[in-house]
Amino acid sequence: MPFEKKLVLIFFTAFGLMLGGVLVGTLAAVVVQEPPLATMQRLSREIRIWAVVAAIGGTFSTIEILESGILKGEIMAVFKQVFYIISSTAGTHLGHLIIQAAAGGEG
């Protein structure tokens, strides 16, 4: 898959993981009669790192690629992984901001 397409795919995967995870978690909060808006805010803070990791395909493969890139001099592989991490983080952050705005939180 071309680099640009993978960046977009990773961004929206992280974005979707944030929105989907928080919305389904909030549905569970409603079922067990917990405050949904407070649960939305808490979940959006708690699952950010998991959305980043899941969107890039797990940490082990990323660490392997970074290691081989640094040790074997494959600098382009290192740059690609860094951009994938940035793309995933951006998608997660956008999802977090949208959730916080919808829940009336700090953003």
Image (spheres, rainbow, N blue to C red):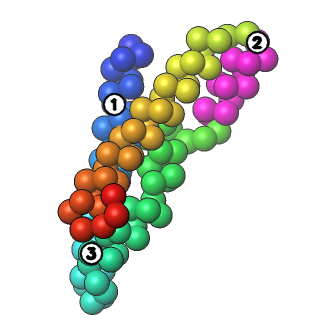
Q: Which residues are magenta?
A: 61-72
Name the disc covering residue 72, or none: 2
Which structural element holds mark 3? helix
Q: Is residue 69 magenta?
A: yes
Question: How packed is label 3: few (under 14 Cα within 10 Å), some, or many (20 or more)?
Answer: some
Quick one: label 2 or label 3, which is nearer the N terminus? 3
Quick one: SS at disc 1?
helix
Q: List the residue tagged with mark 3.
A: 37
| Picture residue at 40% right of the left edge, 67% below the top | 43
Residue 5 lies, in percent from the top left, at 33, 20
Report the residue at 76% width, 12% height from top: 72
Mark 1 Cα shell of 10 Å, populated few (<14), some (14-19), many (≥20): some
Mark in the foreground, 2 or 3: 3
Per the rendering, the mark at residue 63 is none
Q: Amino acid at mark 1?
A: Leu
Q: Amino acid at mark 3?
A: Leu
Q: Main secondary structure of the magenta part?
A: helix
User: Residue 93, position in %: x, y?
Assistant: 38, 47
* Residue 89 x %, y %: 45, 40
Which label's residue is closer to the chain start, 1 or 2?
Answer: 1
Q: Residue at x 48, y 29 (%)?
A: 84
Which label is found at residue 9?
1
